[in-house]
Image: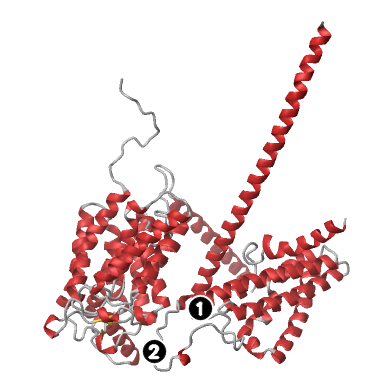
Amino acid sequence: MAKYIVSSSPHITSNTTTQKIMLDVIIALIPATIAAFLIYGLYPIFIMILSVGCAVTAEWLFNLITKRPQSVKDLSAIVTGMILALNLPPVVPFYVPMVGSFFAIIIVKMLFGGIGRNFANPALTARIFLVLCWAGVMTKFVYPIDLSNGMNLFSYFENVVNINLPVEITSATPLAGVKEAIEKMAKGEIVNPAAGLNALDMFLGRIGGSAGEVSTLAILIGALYLLIKRVIDWKIPVLYIGSVVVFTAIFFANSPYVGEYVWTYLLGGGLMFGAFFMATDYATSPKAPLAVCIYGVGLGLLTVIFRKFGSMNEGVSFAILLMNVVTPLLEKLVPCTFGAKSKWETNGKKIAEWFKKVFSKKQKSEEKEAQNG
Amino acid sequence: MKGQFLSNKLGIVKNGILTSNPTFRLVLGMCPTLAVTTSAFNGLGMGLAATIVLVCSNALVSLLRKVIPDKVRIPAYVLIIATFVTMLEMLLKKFVPTLYSALGIYLPLIVVNCIILARAEAFASMNKVGDSILDGLGMGLGFTLALVVMGFVRELLGAGTIFAGSLGSVEFGITQDAFPNYKLPDYALGIFVLPAGGFLTLGILMALVNYLSDKSKEKKEKEHEAKLNRALAVAQAVESANGVQNDAAPAKEEE
């Protein structure tokens, strides 16, 4: 006789597991990794190996010490390590990714209960932690490797322990140029923010920037894979990137170079990477349609505000962290049950009544005054 | 009798330091805790200053507890505390000017420190002078302990030193002056000296304290259970032994 299983709903299950999703994300991150290798040589790969190794070790050790079931097999630690390494500048001292992935796994993820219970994206929070710890290291970016200029794939390896990169090899990022233009604009000078930049170079990634964030093409290939496999939803990235375009146009409307501002903000910095790989983290992004709209637009607005008015050139990570923290509040904007009166309607009516009351009182008192006068 | 008296008094002090530590268990006085603890020495100074004020104000509030009318008790407490804070401020300015300048605005702010007001309201206004002084001492030492631990962690990670600078020669950090020909890299995790690091340290330490106290509580409960089980087993054995006798007795009567 067949064995019958008695259980409560849901009865339809899919064969999706955390492990499979994480494997898809790893596959999607490979183009960006290859781009980092082609642009900066082997050093970013070395950093990524360190970062992934430390993240996995940290999770394994934490589970071992606190006597929890081992969760290394779900591959999420590998994803965290990879995203963190791609978020870092291409050349950082060896201990930076180690400290970063340790912080990401132990403090942001495991102390809050492991995967799915973290309040913010671990890799992104670790990046902010590192920026606040070693601002000098985290804001210095090197030139892409130029093979015709006597450099090889092993260039930059002499900087493994060097905390202060020599000035000769550091390059300005597109966003630094934009910041300069904004500062000059405040003084009354009008400068082209994209002077010396080439949209094709920025699209392919032949610029200074974080290892995995420079090549928009590679990120889009990875993102397309995730979208086709339906690992991520298109709504958050599209709303995020779209609102960045709209708000940039609004914030820089008085400048004759609005178009240049828009495309440098779009292709420079970590916007694409953040929008597709970090803002869409399951545990820290909302699911309800209204909440998703507020989340996406809020991300765009905060990013442009941080980039234009903040002291740092980049604002993507801070914007995502802030919206991650707001997510539980956004989730409370639950749509009303079918057939019930919507919250907006009842609240709107209440407000309208309150206004009526206040105004009628005012009118009465005015009438009285008029009578007395 | 005497031993019980002593343990009773010690319990009041212990309560302040461990069981209801003002920083980690009661979560009071967060403003100085987060702002001042950028170094262990500052934490120590702040903690001791608060302890002195706490002991004095607890004593005076306890002495005046039957005189102060209920309706104006808070202004009266603030007045008492402000008197002691003013005295302390003048003394520090004269004798420890470095600490005075390091604590800055947080020294006069002891007047409205939650811990001092809370102890005046919750303990000193209902208990005798001796107990109130001990409570002030325990709470003050608990506060000092918490601030020193926080300052120690933040200074060690954020600046790479232990009790550096303020205590003169007691300095363990390797300084640039010792290696004039070599540029020392700066490994310090700068975030721990920033406000964000204060919150981070406080959260992690609080989690650690909760974890340890939960563990000791569990251990105590287990011991208690084991004791109970042993007593039950003994009682059952005795009962069954008695039961055999009792069962035997009525049988005889029937005969």
B234 w.r.t. B65: above or below: above
Q: Is residue A105 above or below residue A172?
A: above
Where residue B22 appears, as percent x and y from the top left, is 66, 66
> Quarter-wise, where is residue A11 in the image?
top left
Q: Earlier in the sequence, mark 1 or mark 2?
A: 2
Q: Residue sitting at 75 percent across and 79 percent down?
A: B82
The location of residue B12, given as percent across then percent down, is: 76, 62
- Label 1 and label 2: CA atoms lie apart by 22 Å
Give left or right: position of B25 versus A306.
right
B44 vs A322: above or below:
below
Tag of residue B183:
2
* Residue B107 seen: yes
Name the kind of residue labelled 2 in the image.
Lys
Image colouring: secondary structure
Quarter containing the C terminus of chain B? top right
Q: Is residue B153 left or right of residue A25?
A: right
Q: Is residue A212 visible?
A: no
Label for residue B151? none
In the visual, does A128 lie left or right of A248? Answer: right
**A11 displayed left or right of B105:** left
Chain to which the residue tagged by mark 2 belongs:
B
Asked if the residues shown at circle 1 and circle 2 are in contact, with their CB atoms under 8 angstroms apart, the answer is no
Disc 1 target residue = B193
